[in-house]
Image (tube, coloured by chain):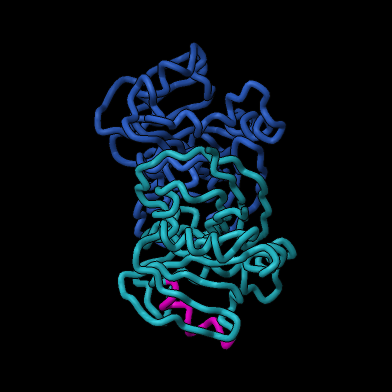
Chain colours: A cyan, B blue
Amino acid sequence: MGKVIIIVSMSLDGFVAGPNPRVAAPLGDGGERLHEWMFAAAPHPFDAAVAGSRFTVETVGAVVMGRTTFDCGIGEWGDDGTFRTPCFVVTHRPGEPVVKGPTTFTFVTDGVDAAVALARRAAGERDVCVMGADVGAQALRAGLVDELQIHVAPVILGAGRTLFGELGTRLPLVPSRVLDSPYATHIRYRVAS
Amino acid sequence: MGKVIIIVSMSLDGFVAGPNPRVAAPLGDGGERLHEWMFAAAPHPFDAAVAGSRFTVETVGAVVMGRTTFDCGIGEWGDDGTFRTPCFVVTHRPGEPVVKGPTTFTFVTDGVDAAVALARRAAGERDVCVMGADVGAQALRAGLVDELQIHVAPVILGAGRTLFGELGTRLPLVPSRVLDSPYATHIRYRVAS
């Protein structure tokens, strides 16, 4: 069975978005710096390698995301929906699936556990990626996460939305790979069980 | 003139101490993991190099710390006071200097700006190290910091004391060196001006 992996870019002070996130600026004020490593004009080879391997269909079999991530992203993800795998959107608002070419977004209204279970089934031997602050924290708290891929961007945002916040749970981690560039320090951790 | 450097170990979720820090356990519940990289039985060469270079009198000419750091540390720092350079303790409580061999701890009651100014003068061409959560954040906010040396320990603490908290200021950083071991990812940043 594949792993459940949280993938997220965050500032050094732990914010996954600056203040005032909105559809026009989903990363909030100043938050574009968080994703600079993906969009640099002259990307560093490590950034390119990390970006290229994050959501390949060879390794990722399904995606779980929060409603905010979906709402902010769907306009940007193009006709193929970007992920090309089943995506499960954790939300309180039921809705018909949204199909973008090879990508289907299914709305799941009974919580992150149910979404991860559906995603695991869809992914088979491949990994499940969890995107988004709230859903990521919920999945961590529920003990559903095997791995973290954290892209630490070189910025202090000073305010905004935290990924982990006061998670209330202590989790030892085991670093398994670090790659760094001028745009981010990419740290991969295994969640110690 | 030397640089003003914040040196701190923090968890992946940005805590510099777990819940309930106290003199007997200054890093709070679970917080000992933050300093494991310094005290591992078989230290990784990178950890040893980083630990060995942090407070050498060749490069560090003075230290600024908060009262909590002083109160928690003074019992541990031995007869030579560990730092072997002038140390300035930012506090509301005035007091006579505490002398431990070559290390003198001077209490500064008129704020972090004053403490950093005194430390700069004492350090001359060498660097000033700033230790401790509150004092570090105050110095950052006041624009007094040139460099950050952050040791990211592989743990989610889930609660406790944050270094940066809601700093309220956005600061772009420039990573200048990353060293990683199983015990920590050591990232050095220049504060972009």
Q: Is residue A166 above or below residue A8?
A: above
* Picture residue at 59% right of the left edge, 58% below the top: B174
Q: Is residue B41 magenta?
A: no
The x and y percentages for residue B84 are 54, 22
Instruction: Tell which of B79 and A179 is nearer to you.
Output: A179
Please give the count of numbered marks on the rendered protein: 0
Res. A184 image quadrant:
bottom right
Instruction: Tell which of B159 and B99 is nearer to you.
Output: B159
* Picture residue at 40% right of the left edge, 59% below the top: A112
Residue B192 in view, yes or no = no
* Picture residue at 60% right of the left edge, 81% below the top: A102
Instruction: Tell which of B28 and A188 is nearer to you.
Output: A188
Residue B26 in view, yes or no = yes
**Residue sticking out furthest to the right:** A45
The x and y percentages for residue A172 are 51, 38
Res. A28 image quadrant:
bottom left
* Picture residue at 57% right of the left edge, 50% below the top: A147
**Which span is picked out in magenta?**
A69-79
